[in-house]
Image (cartoon, coloured by chain):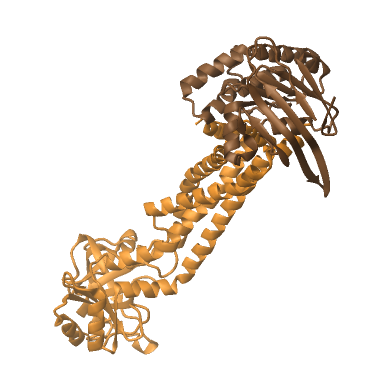
Chain colours: A orange, B brown
Amino acid sequence: MLIFRYSARELLRHPVRSLLAVLGVAVACAMLLDMLMLGGGLNASFRSLLTSAGYELRVSPAGTLPFDTGATIADAGRVQRSLEADTAVAGVAPVLGSNLLVEGGEAERLFVLGVTPAEQGIYRLITGRDPDAGSIVIGRELAREGLAIGDTLALRAPGSFADAGRRTVRYRVAGIADFLYASSGERSAALDLPALAELTDQPDRASLMMVRLAEGEDPEGVAASLRALHPDLEIASVGQLVETAARRLSYFRQLAAILGTVSLIVTTLLIGTIMAISINDRYGTIAALRAIGISRRSIVAAFLVESLLLCVAAAALGLGLGLLVAGQLERILSDFPGLPEAIRFFVFEPDRLAWAAAGVLLAGVGAALVPAIRAMNAPIAATLHREEP
Amino acid sequence: MTGRAGTGPGTNDRLLVEARDVRREYRLKGDLIEAVRGISLEVRGGDFLAIVGPSGSGKSTLLHLLGAVDSPTSGTVFLDGSDVTAMSDPERARFRLEHVGLVFQRFHLLPMLTALENVELPMAEAGLGRRERERRAKDLLGRVGLGDRMRHRPGEISGGQRQRVAVARALANRPALLLADEPTGELDQKTSAEMLQLFTSLNKDGTAIVVATHDLELAAGAQRRLTLVDGKIHE
């Protein structure tokens, strides 16, 4: 323990040097943590979002992802019945999405989803009730703008100049809800599906169908069997959608891997340099300690403890800094256009914290090994000859 | 060349060091340097031997060979009956820890440890418990006249006091042999004289001492002097 006390005090002998090393490694540690959170966070967050409403499969028009394009599923009623006929399927929630114009003042666009209130995974009511033929459920953004339950919202479908005479329909606000897939600041609302289909002149169509499976069913297996029945549709499990999204967003993972590696290299170089300088200053003392019988193992252990103490201090600071920076970056990235607000780029999980800390500690200790072993291999007598006048 | 250190009053006659035809050569920038050339030497318990000679005569090298700090190119060194030249590096380190005390010209104390902790260090390495270490370290520091400087760090005491701490550290594991390489090299005349007194006192208490020195007064205080010239004992 005495040799470890020596290690701790040796760091205090050069407070500025030690502080700079700690700060440098802390920044690298913060970056490593952020990259670990970014690397897996987006996927985990996307999966969590897709499964949050309890629907394991998504059915969309062939060649598209849900709401990727304006394409719709034709003959939606028949498709829904066909899907429901499968014993593995517990429920089907058709969704029709459309941009509508809000009447009054300047016409503003509003993204409206047509749902069947009894079976839907699009929104969660905060207050009020589900929509019916004459009412609408609005999102928080519209509520923030001043709309309240009981108010009226006049909507019409956008169209070409020739369609300018399309009718306007007034809906009473029945409820306020969180829209699970809405992006930050997006104005969303939900109508009863037949009402929206009539307003937008899209009878018997759906943009998407969300399929809830019976308990214990394998989503990939059911998706495959339904795909065989409906080759004209895109049927994907949440896992497959997450994989597709992961492929599309692979540059985030690559970026995270590169920057994470850079942070480990920076840690190694910083600790390696600091320890090399520190050990080189003490070659004479090291030789003397070995001469009086202090074992190589004890001396190497002392240096490793020095490095470890630097890294522990840096990791404690760096992990806090990393969480702070991740929060700031999350705020910036959450405004990414078109991305659901519920998606998180930086997902905190305790194991990522542990991995970041372990990465920095291992890199630091590994970096100290090289100069420590070099010093241990220096011949004692020759070093003492050199050091003594 | 053979040297035999004399025995002092009240000392034992145990053979502590036996060097037989020891040679040490090394290469420096391509040149072969013969630092020690065939020296045979005996040191017995209670001896106080001064190795003198001009710079580069091989004093420090011989001292390192006698203390198992360095290995001879040829020849053998027996320390307390054990052939240290046949030992592995870790074995020699352990042997030095338990059987040899070393004092250096530049003290080589750990600056961030107190005098007490510096003295405790070799005992900690030898596996002694904290209480026993502290008791012995306090006793040793008291013996070298630093009972009131135990909690001071090396930077807070004088050069002479640092060397006394180094002597106390060298005695930590109760070695029978104390080797000192230019122990007064960094000290003034008065402090050097005090160091000689300390060595004489330790020697009287039964510790064999071998000192490599330029200091004629220190050498004169030893029971026997051995002069080295060009790596050989000069009769």
Q: Closer to the camera, B40 or B73? A: B40
Looking at the image, is B171 positioned above or below residue A58?
above
State the residue at coordinates (51%, 65%). Answer: A255
Name the quarter where the N terminus of chain B is drawn: top right
Residue B6 appears left or right of A195:
right
Looking at the image, is B140 positioned above or below residue A197?
above
Q: Closer to the camera, A222 or A333? A: A222
In the rendered image, residue B203, in percent from the top left (x then y), is placed at 67, 14
Q: Furthest-top residue in view?
A: B10
State the residue at coordinates (63%, 29%). Answer: B79
Instruction: Please tell me in which quadrant of the rendered image residue A348 appears.
Output: bottom left
Q: Is residue A102 visible?
A: no
In the rendered image, residue B154, in percent from the top left (x then y), is placed at 65, 23
State the residue at coordinates (43%, 74%). Answer: A248
In the rendered image, residue A294, in percent from the top left (x then y), is placed at 58, 33
Looking at the image, is A378 positioned above or below residue B15?
below
Q: Closer to the camera, A145 or A117? A: A117
Q: Is residue A233 visible?
A: yes
Name the quarter where the C terminus of chain B is drawn: top right
Please count the marks in the image: 0
Instruction: Please tell me in which quadrant of the rendered image residue B2 appears.
Output: top right
Looking at the image, is A39 positioned above or below residue A21?
below
Q: Closer to the camera, B166 or B25? A: B25
In the rendered image, residue A235, in percent from the top left (x then y), is placed at 28, 81
